[in-house]
Image (cartoon, grey):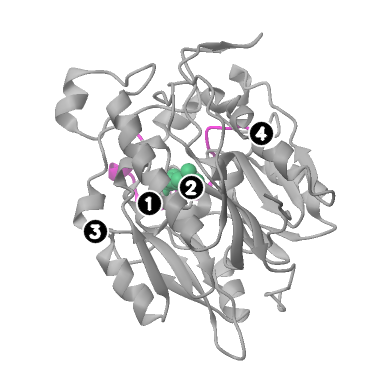
């Protein structure tokens, strides 16, 4: 297979993509940056957040849905690359810390990103995910055959204890009984679990819209991480920082702001937004001024609002879709309300079952990473 590394948008015609694999997956370990929470109260009463390898039947069920997505993409003429899973049940130890096991390689979106002809490996922000990049190195060496491809790896943080603000986990205690003013202040001070002592980001906090890319300041990306990206990329793209104050645990932008198609000939572009995580007014104005229409996603379907017991993502995985081109989207099969909305916006939909993948870190967008799209670094934002 030959590849050209080139991707500037979330919607350009897709040519090559990575799809994750669930083999050897383990439970994401608890650590300063991550606390596991079992969604089913009956199970939560009985056991603590588990450690070690996940059950083989659970892994097989997720792989079946991941393989089905791969076949769907291949049948559309898209090249699909798959990672090389390592043994994620291994204990890992660095000079500064140790965790019982790693996680999995289901979500390449979190670990790497293509921006133009660059493939960038993120620093990552969680100890259990420190070595996840190893599963994608075979792919990156394949892409390296494209002599125009540039490979950047961000500086690995120590992930030592002093990178994390422990107070984060009690920040919302007694929140409901606070005055509106106090609530507003807590939500708008943007203090998350990572402090600013080292550069840290997960690639999934970025969304690409041509010459402009948008990065969410979050639990998984600090301001130093954003500044590193800006210094590396400012010859090619303009970086915008977004905050979503009503998301108490922001992590990865692809359940919050999902661009679907660009403005064209006086017809507005479309961005899917999250009704529970509104943009700040200044950001909303910026998008609208530039001819983008912000459309709230409907509430997730009943089945998907009850998340699987060991899933750490929110019900908003409902909007975690993948664009094949500006008119065609791959969506989770149960999200019927979202399907109707998207059809009314004249999108063609391809539905896939995906619920079994949810507890491995995300849904369709998370478990993929686009390598080649037919697009350029066009500017879709003329007004500041
Ligand atoms: N934190 C997001 C939510 O719960 C889930 C994001 C998953 N995305 C990803 N790329 N892994 O809404």
Mark 4: is the Cβ under 8 angstroms from ligand 1?
Answer: no
Residue 180's x, y, as percent? Answer: 36, 53
Viewport quadrant of the C terminus: bottom right
Residue under pointer 2: 366
Q: Are marks 2 and 1 in contact (CB under 8 Å)?
A: yes
Where's residue 145, x and y in %?
78, 44
* Residue 248 against residue 321 in the figure, above or below: above
Query: Do the CB atoms of the residues marked 1 and 4 lie less than 8 Å apart?
Result: no
Place of residue 190 in the rendered image (x, y in percent of width and height, measured from the top left): 54, 45
Q: Nearer the viewer, mark 1 or mark 4?
A: 4
Mark 1 within 8 Å of ligand 1, using the beta carbon: yes
Question: Does residue 242 lie above or below 193 as drawn?
Answer: below
Q: Which residue is mark 3?
A: 301
Indicate which disc residue 317 carries: 1
Where on the picture, by quarter, is residue 131?
top right
Give the structural element (helix, strand or loop) at label 4. helix
Dot 2 beta carbon under 8 Å from ligand 1: yes
Q: Is residue 12 left or right of residue 42?
A: right
- Camera-side mark, 3 or 4: 4
Using the image, determine if residue 209 lies above or below residue 125. Answer: below
Residue 291 on image: x %, y %: 59, 82
Between discs 1 and 4, the one toward the N terminus: 4
- Write the residue at 73% across / 68% down: 376
Say which of marks 3 and 2 sits in front.
Answer: 2
Residue in the image at 68% along x and 51% along y: 114
Name the residue that disc number 4 marks.
138
Nearer-the-camera pick, 187 or 14:
14
User: Which of marks 3 and 1 precedes in the sequence?
Assistant: 3
Magenta residues (range): 173-195
Disc 1 is placed on an element classified as: helix
């Amino acid at each position: 297979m030959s590849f050209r590394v080139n991707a500037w948008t979330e919607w350009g015609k897709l040519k090559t993509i990575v799809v994750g694999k669930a083999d050897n997956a383990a439970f994401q370990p608890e650590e300063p940056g991550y606390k596991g929470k079992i969604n089913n109260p009956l199970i939560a009463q009985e056991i603590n957040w588990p450690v070690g390898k996940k059950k083989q039947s659970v892994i097989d069920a997720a792989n079946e849905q991941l393989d089905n997505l791969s076949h769907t993409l291949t049948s559309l003429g898209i090249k699909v690359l798959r990672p090389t899973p390592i043994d994620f049940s291994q204990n890992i130890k660095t000079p500064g810390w140790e965790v019982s096991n790693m996680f999995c390689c289901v979500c390449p979106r979190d670990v790497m990103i293509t921006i133009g002809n660059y493939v960038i490996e993120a620093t990552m922000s969680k100890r259990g995910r420190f070595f996840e990049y190893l599963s994608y190195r075979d792919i990156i060496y394949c892409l390296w055959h494209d002599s125009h491809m540039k490979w950047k790896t961000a500086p690995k943080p120590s992930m030592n204890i002093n990178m994390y603000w422990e107070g984060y986990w009690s920040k919302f205690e007694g929140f409901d009984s606070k005055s509106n003013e106090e609530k507003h202040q807590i939500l708008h001070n943007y203090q998350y679990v990572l402090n600013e002592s080292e550069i840290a980001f997960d690639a999934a906090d970025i969304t690409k819209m041509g010459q402009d890319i948008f990065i969410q300041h979050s639990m998984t990306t600090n301001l130093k991480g954003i500044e590193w990206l800006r210094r590396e990329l400012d010859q090619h793209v303009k970086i915008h920082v977004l905050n979503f104050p009503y998301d108490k645990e922001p992590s990865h932008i692809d359940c919050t702001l999902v661009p679907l198609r660009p403005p064209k000939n006086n017809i507005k572009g479309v961005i899917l937004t999250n009704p529970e995580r509104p943009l700040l007014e200044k950001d909303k104005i910026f998008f609208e001024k530039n001819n983008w229409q912000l459309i709230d996603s409907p509430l997730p379907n009943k089945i998907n609002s009850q998340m699987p017991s060991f899933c750490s993502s929110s019900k908003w995985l409902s909007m975690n879709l993948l664009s094949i081109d500006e008119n065609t989207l791959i969506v989770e099969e149960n999200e019927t309300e979202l399907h109707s909305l998207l059809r009314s916006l004249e999108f063609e939909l391809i539905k896939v079952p995906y619920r079994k993948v949810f507890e491995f870190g995300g849904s369709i967008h998370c478990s993929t990473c686009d390598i080649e799209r037919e697009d350029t670094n066009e500017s879709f934002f003329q007004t500041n």
